[in-house]
Each structure stands twice: as structure tokens, then as C-alpha cells.
Image (cartoon, coloured by chain):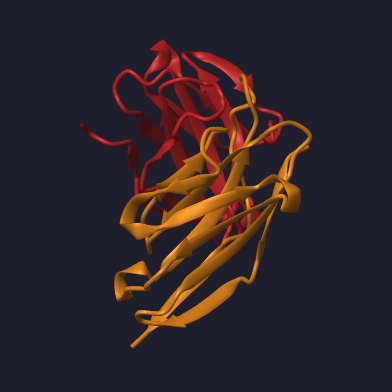
Amino acid sequence: AQSVTQLGSHVSVSEGALVLLRCNYSSSVPPYLFWYVQYPNQGLQLLLKYTSAATLVKGINGFEAEFKKSETSFHLTKPSAHMSDAAEYFCAVSGTGTASKLTFGTGTRLQVML
Amino acid sequence: EAGVAQSPRYKIIEKRQSVAFWCNPISGHATLYWYQQILGQGPKLLIQFQNNGVVDDSQLPKDRFSAERLKGVDSTLKIQPAKLEDSAVYLCASSQAGTGGYEQYFGPGTRLTVT
């Protein structure tokens, strides 16, 4: 069975500071990994995904994530936080073939302070 | 391109009542998913359709939940009878293909409160 663990249910950073949201995965096969963002009262929006091409993945809004097989990690980073980044972030894993359902972590709420 | 549409956006019912949610996926998307998101948790898959066939319903509480996707387009999720623990946001998502790695596009969700 596949799973992801997000360390830290709440992360608070100052505007302009580095954002680091942690995600570790467990999968018996090479996984597909995703980061989604959810703003209040909205659905989820894809930030970026890893599908076994480049290990450093760049996404929207200046976010990027690095796939590290040795550490089973897929941490999300952004060099400089903006107030508009305040939201809930979910890491997710899916299998290959028809096992395409997303298995999500519990989420990390990012707060950005002035 | 229109996104995934869901209705209603909010619904309040009493326990033991029934409720239905509707989803219209992005045009041309063969795969449709229903997820349940309980407050403070990540979404959890309830059911996955490929066209009008069910691919995965292993997490669907079949004694009270049902879903259909007639004609392989729109989908309806029903709960009958509702329990307090069904209070959650129900998210519909669609994807071009049902294989892993394809982006899933999510609708705004339906927030259900069971009192």
C-alpha cells in the first residue's frame, strides 16, 4: 500500500523567508508524487508533480520539489514566501496503471506573517 | 476551458435523511473520482469511474453510499441514510486518463453538514 506522511500540520514563516514543507512517501513501486494547494472553500489545485523524469520539479507560483529516492522524500520549497501563499498544502502519491487514485497526506497549513 | 462543476456547494441535513451531490467533469475526461475530505484530513477516495464503469469502490460504504455515472459524463453521489460522521467536503475530480501520473482536476466541493 502507498502512503505519504507530512511532517508538521502547521508551518509559519515571515514574508520573504524560505518555505519548506516536508513530505515522505512509502511505495513498493516507483511512485508518482504530487503537491496540491487548497485555498479556503476551494478545491485542490496542482502545484507540481513527479513522474520519474527530472528529480527536481518546478511548479507554479515559484514552488519546486526534489524527489530523493534514498530518503523517500519529496519536500516542497519556495525561496521567498508571499502573503498569497497562505493556504493548505497536500502531498499525494499515486500508483501506475489503473491504480491512479491519489492517496493524500494530512496536509500542512502554511501561515505567512508580515 | 470550463473546470469541474459541482452542486450544491453547501448542504445541511439531519441524520437519517438522504442527500445527493452532482458533478460535471471537464469535457472529454474519461476518468472521474469522488473523494471525501473530513475536516483536518486529506481527501480520501470513495469511488473511481472509467467512462461509465467502476474501477475502484473499495472505500465506498456501500450500505449507505451509492454513485453512478450514466453515459460516462455527469455523476451523482448519494448518501442514504446520512450519519453524523458523513459531515465532510465531497470533492469531485476528473482526469484525461485513468492511469497514474495524469493530473486530476478538482471541483470546488460540496460541504455537507449532518446534524
Residue B43 visible in rendering: no
Task: Give the tally of numbered discs.
Answer: 0
Q: Residue at x 56, y 56 (%)?
A: B87
Q: Residue at x 63, y 25 (%)?
A: A96
Classify A6 as above or below B23: below
Q: Position of residue A4 (x, y in %)?
A: 68, 51
Q: In the rendered image of this protein, which colour is used for chain B?
A: red
Q: Position of residue A5 (x, y in %)?
A: 69, 57
Q: Quadrant of the C terminus of chain B?
A: bottom right
Looking at the image, which is closer to me, A55 or A27? A55
Q: Is residue B53 left or right of residue B104?
A: right
Q: Is residue A105 left or right of residue B27?
A: right
Q: Residue at x 47, y 71 (%)?
A: A19
Q: In the rendered image of this protein, which colour is used for chain A?
A: orange
Q: Position of residue B13 (x, y in %)?
A: 48, 54
Q: Residue at the left extreme? A: B1
Classify A75 as above or below A109: above
Looking at the image, which is closer to me, B98 or A22? A22
Residue B59 visible in rendering: yes
Q: Quadrant of residue A79?
A: bottom left
Looking at the image, which is closer to me, B103 or B59? B103
Q: Residue at the bottom extreme? A: A114
Q: Quadrant of residue B8?
A: top left
Classify B2 as above or below A3: above
Q: Position of residue A104 (x, y in %)?
A: 61, 48
